[in-house]
Image (cartoon, rainbow, N blue to C red):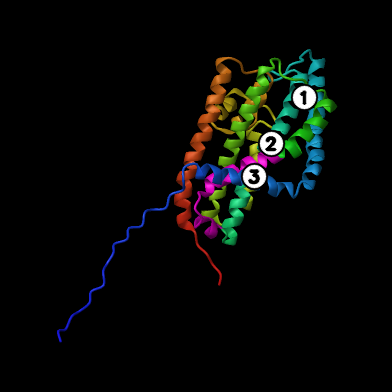
Amino acid sequence: MSDRTATAPTYEVTLAPWRRERGGSVRLYLGFVRLAFLKFLAYRLRYYTGVISYTIFVAGNAYLYRALFASRAEAGSVEIGGFTLAEMITYIAVAWIGRSFTFNNIDRTLSHQVQQGEIAMQLIKPFHVQTVMMFEAIGEAAFRLLMFTVPIMVVVVPLFGIHGPPDPALYGWTVLSFTLALIMNSQLNFLVGCLAFYLKNITGVIRAKHISMDFLSGVLVPFTFFPEWFQTVVAWLPFQGLSFVPVTIYLGKRTGPDLAEALIVQAAWAVGMFLVGRWLWNRAVRQVTLQGG
């Protein structure tokens, strides 16, 4: 009897890398827009108090500037920093209305995820956290537009006699500018949030950012009220694109080539900060440390 060794057949199996089907990424990220909208919809009652607080902010600034213009009118001047009193009141109202649309807490959310260790679960999921947060910010902005911005407009516009822009076409350009401001603000907040990987606790940084941004974006005081050297420095920074640029477009202060240039600069900053955010994220995630048991 011969000794035979049975040899089992062998097969080579090559696993193709997983790829999401065409259009799958778009559907995935658009789903985060819907989820963010529904999440904030569950807490919509707290935004009704925001309508009151924003009205108070506008009223306080409006009466302050009315007093300022009244004192200058006695000296024979009825225009300050290139604005009349009516334009100044409109500036304040539109700036705060726009802020209610572009505001988000990406930096605070990212910081919380890093501190609580939740970022580890985000890193193993088949999506990019930066892109997800951007689309969630869009969903939040859609919610804010319907449940926060529009109610503020309903209260503030008739209360302070806010008029429309000198050219109806500026409505569309203003909406586009505030949309770009939303993207810019989201990416700026993402950059600040990435600091949590290095500093762990960035509560103080976030508070300082909120205070400085209201000032540097032109929400509190238009840049034209400041000295020429300050305006020159700020012109090289992205912050004026968050509020000052959209509001001056609404007021008709930017037309023709100046309008096109302002929008192009906003778009360039939005893309640039997104790319810087992606670069910083790829390096920041190397700092992830998890503790517990």
**Residue 215, picture quadrant:** top right
Q: Nearer the viewer, mark 3 or mark 1?
A: 3
Q: Nearer the viewer, mark 2 or mark 3?
A: 3
Is residue 224 in view from this perspective? no
Residue at 74 percent across and 20 percent down: it is: 164
Query: Which is more N-terminal, label 1 or label 3?
Result: 3
**Distance between the alpha carbons at the discs numbered 2 and 3:** 17 Å
Residue at 69 percent across and 47 percent down: it is: 38
The circle on residue 134 is: none
Q: Classify mark 1: residues with Cα within 10 Å, few (<14), some (14-19) or many (20+).
A: many
Q: Circle 1 is placed at which residue position?
A: 89
At label 3, the amino acid type is Arg
Discs 1, 2 touching: Cβ within 8 Å: no
The N terminus: image quadrant: bottom left
Q: Nearer the viewer, mark 1 or mark 2?
A: 2
Q: Classify mark 2: residues with Cα within 10 Å, few (<14), some (14-19) or many (20+).
A: many
Magenta stretch holds residue 285: no
Q: Circle 2 is placed at which residue position?
A: 101
At label 2, the amino acid type is Phe
Query: Which is more N-terminal, label 3 or label 2?
Result: 3
Residue at 82 percent across and 32 percent down: it is: 155
The circle on residue 34 is: 3
Q: Is residue 40 above or below residue 266?
A: below
Q: What is the magenta range? A: 119-143
Residue nearer the viewer, 77 or 47: 47
Q: Is residue 60 above or below residue 81?
A: below
Q: Is residue 64 left or right of residue 121?
A: right
Main secondary structure along the magenta-highlighted residues: helix
- Residue 14 in the image: state x and y as whole percent: 32, 58
Query: Which is more N-terminal, label 2 or label 1?
Result: 1
- Residue 262 in the image: state x and y as whole percent: 56, 23
